[in-house]
Amino acid sequence: MICKSALAIVLFLSPCAALCQTEGGTLPAETPLALRIDDHLPMRDGQPVRAHLIYPVYANDKLLLPKDTVVTGSVVELRNDRSRRIRAGMGGDFTPFHKPVVHFTSFVFPDGTTIPFTSDDAADGAPIFRAVPTPPAKGGFIHRQWDGLLSVARSDVAIFTAPGKGDRFVQFIYTQIPYHPQRIDKGTAWTIETSHSVELPALPAPPVVAAEVPKKPHFWEEPPPADPATADTGSWIVQANLDEAISSETSKDGQAIKATVAEPIYNPDHTIAIPQGSTLIGAVTRAKPARKFGRTGVLTFSFNQLQVPHEETRTVETRLTGADSARDIALNSEGQPKSKPQDKISLPILLALMASRPLDQDEGKLGGGGNTLGKNAVGGAAGLGLVGTVIGLTGVSPNVAAGIGYWGAARATYYRWIAKGQKIDFAKNTRIVVETTPRKSAPMKPDQQP
């Protein structure tokens, strides 16, 4: 019985493995490549960078580069991050922050083969967040507000419980120091385009790895989002890249947009239903810039046409079910981007309580002088980190120490309640996932050129 079960699993997985084989071919110029690093790297000129593909790359409906293909390059320039320097300096952190410019040059395959390629420099590296639709809202206003507060509370708890909490604590300590080392954070991603076509060899299928069984989340953890690419909805799940950037700050209502299908969609008999390179055509339905007092930007868009090469443009009904973003946003149940709820209360209150400590003097009690210095240090730390702590320990008046602390509380309040809210934008070549109802059309053979 065990042997039969094992044989059944192998037979089930063998077609999947065959699909991961590559036949070799030409990777066209201007092909987008989404890359991500898996380790922290020093922030220095000349630093080697080893990244991997986030998504597989197809051309003419053939898999040319599997997911996780290694891509290497190096840091070629460090640019001043002026906005971050100013904001950090206001909190007592005078580190000269930089943005790395990375130039990727080679594909590295499992057998050690290296294929050079050319591309533009990548200067917009940032961690990638995958936005997925939230479940439909249930209940009335109070129930929805409770769900929002629960989401914020879970995010706060995740700071102390999620993997990497030790590293986050170290980075927090660094932010309290006037000068500290910089790094390129693990998970930083770039999207580049090849400048010229590249000839790629055929590659064998990678070994089949058993999927990990997801653990049941605790009640204080966000439930893992469903992967739209594997959901059995009876619809097509289309992976596509945006042809141009769109933003709540610059886009206009009615602006035409396009997205290029990145991976072919197959029928059950493995004929091609939607070839790679097809175009989704749509428009921005609503755009409003972010405004003061924390009001986030608004950006909604949809696709209503599918243009397949050598076929008439067809009308389709689509829903956005996933989108990568350099900002931590979410999609509502209708697939419209929105900002995630943020904790605007806890940190300002905590800093205000720390700032008030120097004003709480224990006069006449034994050891009052030392206690005063300690309270002054707490107040100073709330405003300027280690710099404020040192100032508080020098014996300044409690009013000065409290003033430094209230400066920190005021900054936190400003950025959360008064400053302009978060904008919503998607860069060129952003990977989106669209769900659309299958259309009836003549199938295309896998070897048929579009």
Image (tube, helix red, strand yellow):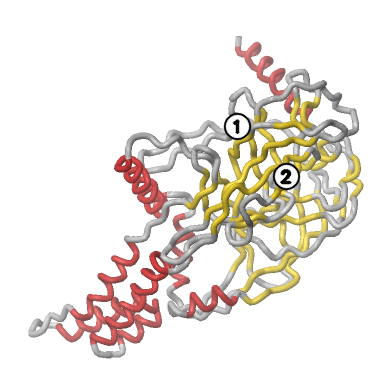
Q: What element carries label 2?
A: strand
- The residue positioned 30% from the left and 84% from the top of the image is 392
- The residue positioned 38% from the left and 48% from the top of the image is 154
Depth order, front residue of 287/359: 287
For label 2, the crowd category at 10 Å Cα-Cα, with few meaning under 14, some 14 to 19 and many 20 or more, is many
Q: What element carries label 1?
A: loop
Q: Are marks 1 and 2 in contact (CB under 8 Å)?
A: no
Q: In which quarter of the image is residue 195?
A: bottom right
- In the rendered image of this protein, does residue 362 appear above or below residue 102? below
Furthest residue to the top?
Answer: 1
Q: Which amino acid does label 1 sit on?
A: Ala
Residue under pointer 2: 259
Disc 1 or 2, which lies upstream in sequence? 1
- In the rendered image of this protein, does residue 37 appear above or below residue 12? below
Q: Check the picture and name the quadrant holding the N terminus.
A: top right
Depth order, front residue of 136/186: 136
Q: What residue type is labelled 2?
A: Ala
Q: Of the residues tagged 1 and 2, which is closer to the observer?
A: 2
Where residue 241 sits in the image (x, y, percent)? Answer: 71, 46
Where residue 416 sits in the image (x, y, percent)? Answer: 40, 65
Residue 204 shows in this picture = no
Q: Check the picture and name the quadrant holding the C terminus.
A: top right
Cα–Cα gap, marks 1 and 2: 31 Å
- The residue positioned 52% from the left and 57% from the top of the image is 297
Label disc, if present, on residue 211 of the rendered structure = 1
